[in-house]
Each structure stands twice: as structure tokens, then as C-alpha cells.
Amino acid sequence: MRFQQIKELLHYLEQVHHQLGLCYGRLISQVDSERSRMLLVYLQGREDAASAHLHEYAAQLGEAVRETWLNQSFSEDMLPAITGCELPASAQTGEILALVCRWEEQLVGELGHLARECPTPAIATMLDNLAALEQTRLHRLVHGVHRLDDM
């Protein structure tokens, strides 16, 4: 996929989080474990909040930033993998966490790559900040899942 402007990149990120929320909602009915269902419900809400946050963030950016052109794009479209995701009924929280970590790490990696290839320092900083936000969300999730497993 090829992005042309920052606003399109932010819209894509918003769509990724929205689709992740839908995916987790769909997976709730596929797993047998109560803990796994609780985790998926949490993940669904987490992704819905992230999507809404990105929408608000994009709306608050100045026109000059939103219209900045990028020469690079994500190396792989994440949406088909997200929409086609399935889990076995026996999936435990660790398996779900591994799946979430793969997607989150892919987002962080792609945003970091775009920041390194960015045409302006201000946009590079913005993309680095988005990558750092995704990384922070991932750390909090991992810690939260470990606390759930300790209960």
C-alpha cells in the first residue's frame, strides 16, 4: 500500500484499530475460556478507544501537517490478516497475547520505519511519538494480562 499524505496514514491507523476491535469482538464467541473472553472484551474496548483517539488526533492536526506528503508506506497491509483472523476454541490468554503482540509490534515497526524515512523532522517526531504510544499501549497490555493470569 502507498500513502500519499499524513491524513491518509492516520485514517489507515484508525481503520487498523477499528478492525482490531471488530476482530476481537468476533473472536469472543470462538473461545471457550472465560479468561480468554474477558481479555477479548477488554481488547475490543481498548481498540475502539484507540480508533476514537486517532480520529480526534487527526482532526486536531493543522492543515499543513495533515497535507504533508510521504514517500514511504507500510510494507504490508495489515487489514486482510486482521479480518481473516481465527482462534481455536481452546485459545488461552497467552495465545491471544502473542497474537496481539505481533500486530502491535508490526505497527510500531512500520511507524518507526516511516519516521526514519520521513521528509521533515516535525513529521518524523510525530510518527516517532505515535510509535512510542503504540509501544506504551503494548507494555501496559502485557502487564495487565500477567496480572489477569495471576488472579
Image: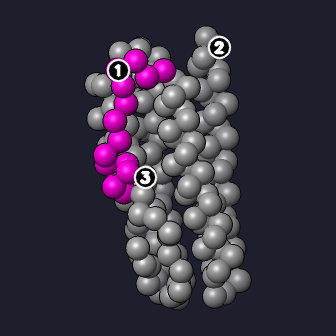
Magenta region, mostly helix, strand or loop? loop
Q: Earlier in the sequence, mark 3 or mark 1?
A: 3
Q: Amino acid at mark 3?
A: His
Q: Amino acid at mark 2?
A: Asp
Percent position (x, y) of residue 52? 42, 54
Q: Which residue is mark 2?
A: 150
Residue for point 56% across, 55% down: 106
Q: Which residue is mark 3?
A: 17
Residue density around tag 3, few if under 14, some if 14–19, many if 20 or more, within 10 Å: many
Q: Which residue is mark 1?
A: 89
Residue for point 63% across, 70% down: 113
Residue density around tag 2, few if under 14, some if 14–19, many if 20 or more, within 10 Å: few
* 62 or 44: nearer the viewer: 44
Circle 2: element type: helix
| Image quadrant containing the N terminus | bottom left
The magenta stretch is 79-92
Residue for point 46% across, 69% down: 10
Does the rendering let one see residue 65? Answer: yes
Q: Earlier in the sequence, mark 2 or mark 3?
A: 3
Does the rendering let one see residue 18? Answer: no
The part of the image, by quadrant, that contains residue 13 is bottom left
